[in-house]
Image (cartoon, rainbow, N blue to C red):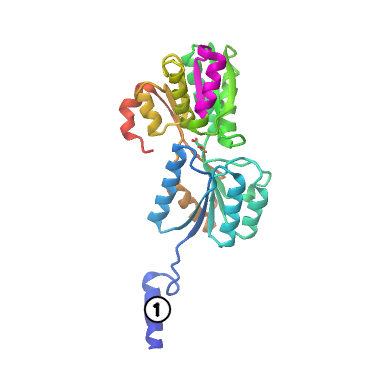
Amino acid sequence: MKKFAAALACLCALLCGSCAFGDDKPLVVGFAQIGAESGWRTAETDSVLSAAKELGIDLKFSDAQQKQENQIKAIRSFIAQGVDGILLAPVVETGWEPVLNEAKKAGIPVILLDRGIVTDDDSLYVCKITSDFVFEGREAAKWVVKELNGKGNVVQLQGTPGASAALERQKGFEEELAQHPDVKILESQTGDFTMELGKQVMEAFLKKYGKDIQVVYAHNDDMGLGAVQAIREAGFKPGTDIKVITIDATKHAFQAMVDGDINAVVECNPLLGPLAFETLKKAIAGEALEKWIVQKDELFEMSQAAELIGLRKY
Ligand code: GYE
């Protein structure tokens, strides 16, 4: 009987090309997600979960509720469980060295998903898969300059303090506006990438500056959608009295463009699941990879929204 089983195992190994019975273990991957602060992030989570399912990957998912300490704990637990790889969406840019060193010592490759980190030691992660946030900010600024004919007032709703997506969207925007001194940023404040805080901050801006505000630049759709509510409640017409430009280009924001409430959006692709796993598999196989795998984005205006909304995938 034993001999028969061994022969069967050998035959099977030959036919399947794998070495032994039961060796076809699924890849185990930990995903340290930031939270569920925005429609964009929910779309990203769905993309990663469904890609994992499709590829037969055993995914350990952790939602850190926007707290770095929770992400660090999640990574430590992934290391303890001996995962094959880690996807990290870093809520802020700094403070990752200790835990990433632990992953490195354990020989576990880490891929940064959707935001970057700042470190002197590039060997702590395999690569980052993100959009170019400086480019996004610059595109938004160019649109604002065009819309205001080179003169007017803007307020800025910033993303999470310390997040690469917020810092770089601000950098690109302000660098571009520096060339147009008659376009003034009245004030910038964080709305933490959420609709609720975006609305609150906009309410405060409206109290302070009223109709002096001509354009709102929001680092993501959710804060922009919150600002739209605040503008309406203050008795103004969003999209007309006060123009709104946001980043992400979710269906929700496209609908707001169709409705005339948002004037323009800069795209940021959240559908990163398939690419993340493809890249991680390459990393595990020891293939050399680009340090930054950049996602290409474009700007859409209100006039294009009705035609394109049906094509939007998130
Ligand atoms: O734009 C925002 C989210 O990190 C690129 O985070 C991501 C940003 C996205 O909460 O909506």
Magenta span: predominant SS is helix
**The magenta stretch spans residue 302:** no
* Residue ID for mark 1: 9
Q: Position of residue 272 (x, y in %)?
A: 45, 44
Q: Position of residue 230 (x, y in %)?
A: 47, 22
Q: Position of residue 11 (x, y in %)?
A: 37, 78
Q: Which residue shows up at 44% across the image and 42% down it?
A: 42
Residue 84 lies left or right of residue 308; in this view the side is right
Q: Position of residue 292 (x, y in %)?
A: 55, 42
Label 1 neighbour load within 10 Å: few <14, some 14-19, many 20+: some
Nearest the camera: 284 or 172?
A: 172
* For residue 59, above or below residue 127: below
* For residue 186, above or below residue 10: above
| Magenta residues, start to end | 198-219
State which quadrant residue 303 falls in.
Answer: top left
Q: Which residue shows up at 41% across the image and 51% down it?
A: 51
Q: Is residue 287 visible?
A: no
